[in-house]
Image (cartoon, rainbow, N blue to C red):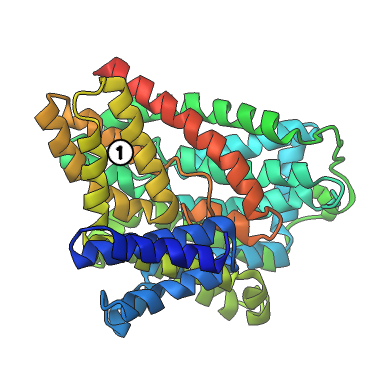
Amino acid sequence: MTLTGATVIALVLYWGINLDEPLRIGLSILAFIALLWITETFHITITALLIPLLTVGSGVFSASEALRNFAHPIIFLFLGGFALAAALHRQQIDVRLASLVMRAAHGQLSRAALLLFATTAFVSMWISNTATTAMMLPLALGLLARLPYEKYRATHWYLLLGLAYSANIGGIGTLVGSPPNAIAAAASGISFVEWFSFGLPIVLVMLPLVVILLRLLLQPDLSYHLEPTTELSAEQGPLTLQQRLTLGVFLLTVLLWLLSRPISELLGIGAGFDSLVSIMAIVLIAALRLVEWNDIEGSANWGVLLLFGGGLTLSAMLKETGTSVFLAEGAAGLLQGAPLLMLLLVIVLFMVFLTEVASNTASSALMVPIFASIAEAMGVSSTVMTVVIAIAASCAFMLPVATPPNAIVYGCGYVPQGQMMRAGVVMNLVLACLISLGAWWII
């Protein structure tokens, strides 16, 4: 698909359908951007930068409104994660963590990978998927440091995609694990304990399934025996003062993220508290001379930050033009009278693939009330439907823009978007079927 092809399709959508102009604009921009992202006609960051240009040029937003999302709090949360990763790497904490994992795995890369995935999923249940991935990424890179990329490509893909997917799945486990969970709970009145009672079993089923599928798809070489010696050994001696300070800042940041809700409520700060914690971490590691700014610049993937600015702007455009609502209602309308299982499958697939090109938080905020109303009209439990929507929003594995973990892993430069798409589409389809069957059985 070339730029010309994407342009033609967008123009056909705009001029060839009889809808209100905002909807035609929204559908055209969505199709144009989605095609460019999927086909990589340009680098995905360049495509993301087209979004504010298109939304301003089409009259959806003013320039200030279109660019507002490029200073969204999640951008600073990302930047703080990159800075922490830079400090951990500079002080060789990532090497020590890798050594601990390998000691527990007895030097077997296959065991180390499973420990990495399990740890990532567990941590992601309690803090943001973004922060979890940023924290665990240095460990994954430490495990891969001895494996030449050209020879062990599939192994790099397996560990890095597994890391992102584990973070996405782990976030399903608790109300605080992922924003869509809280949105669904607020709409249906589900308590923390109630969510945990089914969220944890979902994680325990999904995580092994995804790991098995990923291993079958990629066929990674996990026979390499990693001896926890030399640079990957704890025999480096006791922690230095700088290493202890680095760990102190890291643990303080994690603690504040874990306690973000009560602390932010106490201080009256609101939803941006996690991002303020990230900024604090950047200031601390720089002030304590734990890392140089040049290291942070080198560690931060500015393309990923711009990518999410574009993705958030796209989500805002879909909401402003009514495109998301139109697509959801259209999907439900087409299935009137269809078997319940088919209806659930189509709704889940719609949500999964919508989240591939739009923020899962924004998509959930838009779709939860719509599909809750549709469920009530059909005589189906609206609570089950809202939970299904929230879970589906965490199961977008194809594109870097789909979720923060995907973007962070993609930002390493080791996983081509084409490879992420090939693995991700299988995960999307299998987990969509699993979610649909589970909801159908409960209903």
Secondary structure, mark 1, is helix
Which residue is at the far top?
A: 441
What residue do we see at 63% from left, 27% from top? 212
Q: Tell which of 380 and 70 is nearer to you.
A: 380
Horizontal arrangement in the rendering, residue 103 relative to residue 173 (left or right)? right
* Residue at x 40% of width, y 35% of height: 173
Whether residue 120 is visible here, answered yes or no, is: no
Residue 32 x %, y %: 44, 63
Q: Residues within 10 Å of mark 1 (few under 14, many from 20)?
A: many
Image spot of residue 278 (x, y percent):
46, 67
Looking at the picture, does residue 79 appear above or below residue 196? Answer: below
Q: Looking at the image, can residue 12 be seen?
A: yes
What residue is drawn where x is 81% and y is 35%? 221
Quadrant including the C terminus: top left
Horizontally, residue 89 falls left or right of residue 398, namely right
Instruction: Give the labeled residue for mark 1.
Output: 389
Q: Is residue 436 left or right of residue 405?
A: left
